[in-house]
Image (tube, rainbow, N blue to C red):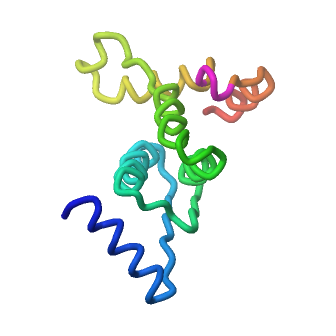
Amino acid sequence: MPISSIRDSVNQFRKHKNGQVVLVLQGGGALGAYQVGVYQALHEAGVEPDWIIGTSIGAINAGLIVGNELEDRLAKLEEFWRRMKRPAAAGFAPLLPGVSDIWSSWSTLVAGIPGFFKPTLGHFRACISRGV
């Protein structure tokens, strides 16, 4: 379906049915990255949601969308997810299943995610004392 007809269909729905477009973004880190594509498709079709609701990572994405000017939203989402990308574990990881996940978890715990958060020593000590 051509983009203009998608936008026209949505506008007809809004006008004649008093409808609203609601973008609901759930939690789950990997899903958060996919949500960028969902918003991109809507944005490129000229459909901006009337409401955006999110939980967990979905709330962060929602905040990035509504907290920026229309023309900056997609770029801000993409910038955020570029910063979240973590390097793969050392080259031996494919040989040992699960090592990459453990490496990623520990590196995030110890070093945080640059540009997003930096863990405090107190938090790190609390995690170790709980056996995390």
Q: How many marks?
A: 0
Q: Residue at x 46, y 34 (%)?
A: 78
Q: Residue at x 63, y 32 (%)?
A: 131
Q: Residue furthest left?
A: 1
Q: Residue at x 28, y 12 (%)?
A: 92
Give left or right: position of 128 versus 43. Answer: right
In the image, the segment drawn in magenta is: 113-117
Q: Is residue 119 magenta?
A: no
Please, is residue 90 above or below residue 86 in the view? above
Q: Quadrant of residue 123?
A: top right
Residue 101 position, x and y percent, is 41, 29
Q: Quadrant location of the N terminus?
A: bottom left
Please, is residue 61 above or below residue 132 in the view? below
Q: Quadrant of residue 120?
A: top right
Q: Residue at x 50, y 59 (%)?
A: 26
Report the front residue among 78 and 107: 78
Q: Quadrant of residue 111?
A: top right
Residue 14 position, x and y percent, is 47, 79
Q: Quadrant location of the C terminus?
A: top right
Give left or right: position of 91 versus 89. Answer: left
Q: Residue furthest top?
A: 91
Main SS of residues in magenta: loop
Residue 97 position, x and y percent, is 28, 28
Report the front residue among 115 and 95: 115
